[in-house]
Amino acid sequence: MLKFKTFLISVLYIVLTMAFLPSFAMELSTDTRCFDDLEPKCQKMIIAVGVITKDTPKQFTEFSQNFPAGTYVLFSSKGGMLDSGLMIGKRIREAKFNTIIGNTEFSSADCLSSCAYAFFGGVKRKIPTTGHLGLHHYYSKTQIIDIEQQQRINQSLTRYLESMGIDPRLLEYANSAKSTNMTYITERQAKEYKIE
């Protein structure tokens, strides 16, 4: 996994994003949120809103260090940096946190692009009926990714998905969407790919 991290940071600097990505970096806070299908229904959660940047993993680790296992992380994010999303997902799994998609007063119930990979770290993962989980093909803003690099990235992402208990076929589905588009996971697909 160290080689994977080094590869993403030093060779590519890949960004997963979409049009009209909000310009503010991810902000972390806590709030008690209620969802009908949770037990208990209302729980104190870590609220993660905004763009995932290179600094977000460190900030998330520091912010979340005193939260107990089983805490839900609520995501509202259009995406950001792929490697950072993966690092957050690993931290979430190490801490045995759960994940859910939700909105705030100023953001929608979306977890898109790299946010999805952070979301996958949850021991339990919830996509409410009002939530949207979206994926597309990764890309780099700084260089063209050749076939060999794509193969290496795909292999690393496949291992990541498998480590999170998710069907690796999801990657093929994600890559079917161009980097300028977004494909959204349906309730049926969430079950099929073992996301929920």
Image: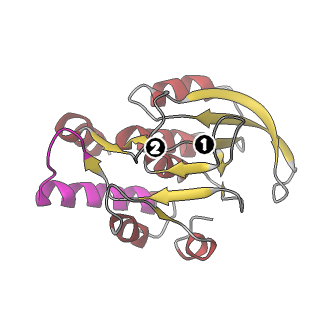
Give me the residue at 35% from left, 70% from top. 172
Mark 1 residue type: Ser
Element assignment for label 1: strand
User: Based on the displayed image, in which of its 4 quarters is residue 124 positioned?
Assistant: bottom right
Relative to 110, 116 lies left or right: left
Q: Is residue 135 visible?
A: yes
> Residue 110 in the image: x percent, y percent?
58, 50
Q: Is residue 16 above or below residue 57?
A: below
Towards the viewer: 138 or 119 = 138
User: How far from the left and from the top, in percent, is residue 106?
Assistant: 66, 34
**Residue to which mark 1 is pinned:** 76
> Which residue is drawn at the image coordinates 34% and 55% (left, top)?
180
Is the stretch drawn in magenta largely helix, strand or loop?
helix
Q: Amino acid at mark 2?
A: Gly
Which picture quadrant has residue 157?
bottom left
- Classed neighbour count for the residue bearing mark 2: other residues with Cα under 10 Å, few (<14), some (14–19), many (≥20): many
Quarter that holds the C terminus: bottom right
Q: How is the image coloured?
A: secondary structure
- Residues in magenta? 140-162
